[in-house]
Amino acid sequence: MVGIRGQKIPKFDYNNPKKYLHDIDKYLTKKRCPNQNKLLEIERILEDKIQQWYESKNSTIRDYNRFKVAFLDKYYPTPSRLAFRDKWVNQKYNNNISFQEYFYTQQDQSKYIEPPMTVDEINCIIIKQMPQFIQNSFAASIDYNNTDQITTALIRLDLNRNIQTNKKRQETKNIRQINIIEDINHDIEQNDTLDQDNPEPEENHQQYQINTMNLLNNNYQNNFRDFIDELEDEINGPFHNDNDQSQLDHKNTCARIKVKINSRTLNA
């Protein structure tokens, strides 16, 4: 729902009635509504159930400030206020957000605590919700009445943590890369030794390099080379009978198979 001059009318939240009053304050301020007209505007924008309550209290509510007190007494009784305050006080920082962002979030929520807390109380409680090393670093050097000093210190801690996190991430990445290179070199050395002991035909050398760099399973590599060698034996082996067409066909078939295997492997 949109009010006059395009201002969005606040929507009542039973879970946080004080936030609703805060939103109404902002709404009236943006509308530049004079004090004497605020109750008239309130009557216009209240939702049905709240408007019924307001009409029943209309004779005792003479101004906007009295409306806010009566509203909180009705919709934000003491048990609800204590429950909200306890929930806020018992919050704990988690690593999903920065220290600075957590501090601002908790500060914003503290506006809805009733009765209001002092600045130093709010700041002190928020710092106690943070990791122990932050509490220790703030213990002797921070004025809890100085919110700017606290946020500046938290920004610095966030930057230091990001630097350390990136450093550890890079170190881990470097170690992983070194391990991979060592594994590759080890496999190359092993396969070079095998290749020197059992030299392959020149046409299989490219396939050997590809297999090595792709770190294929050693058993698979050996089986693959054995199969290629068997094809080579069939292709290059002597004829039992020079006039035997079936043997010639068999050799041609083996040659085609070898070419096809090499072609598919090189393009893989």
Image (tube, rainbow, N blue to C red):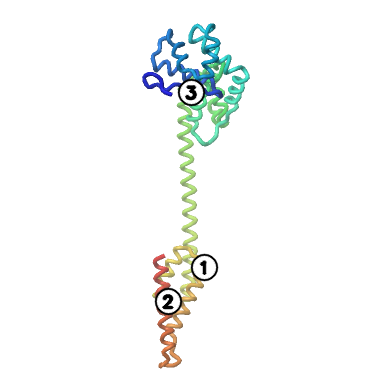
Position of residue 139 measured from the top left corner of the image (x, y, whole percent): 55, 24
Image quadrant for the C terminus?
Answer: bottom left
Task: Quadrant for residue 203, please give it.
Answer: bottom left
Residue at (57, 30) in percent of width and height: 92
Disc on res. 11:
3
Query: Could you say which is closer to the camera, residue 125 or residue 34?
Result: 34
* Distance in Å between CA atoms under marks 3 and 2: 76 Å
- For disc 1, the marked residue is 218
Residue at (48, 41) in percent of width and height: 165
Disc on res. 12:
none
- For disc 2, the marked residue is 257
The answer to the question of whether label 3 and label 2 lie on touching residues, with beta carbons closer than 8 A, is no
Position of residue 218 measured from the top left corner of the image (x, y, whole percent): 52, 67
The answer to the question of whether label 3 and label 1 lie on touching residues, with beta carbons closer than 8 A, is no
Q: Image check: 260 left or right of 138?
A: left
Q: Image check: 125 left or right of 4?
A: right
Residue 37, compared with residue 185, is above or below; it is: above
Task: Quadrant for residue 116, please give it.
Answer: top right
Query: Could you say which is closer to the camera, residue 73 or residue 263?
Result: 73
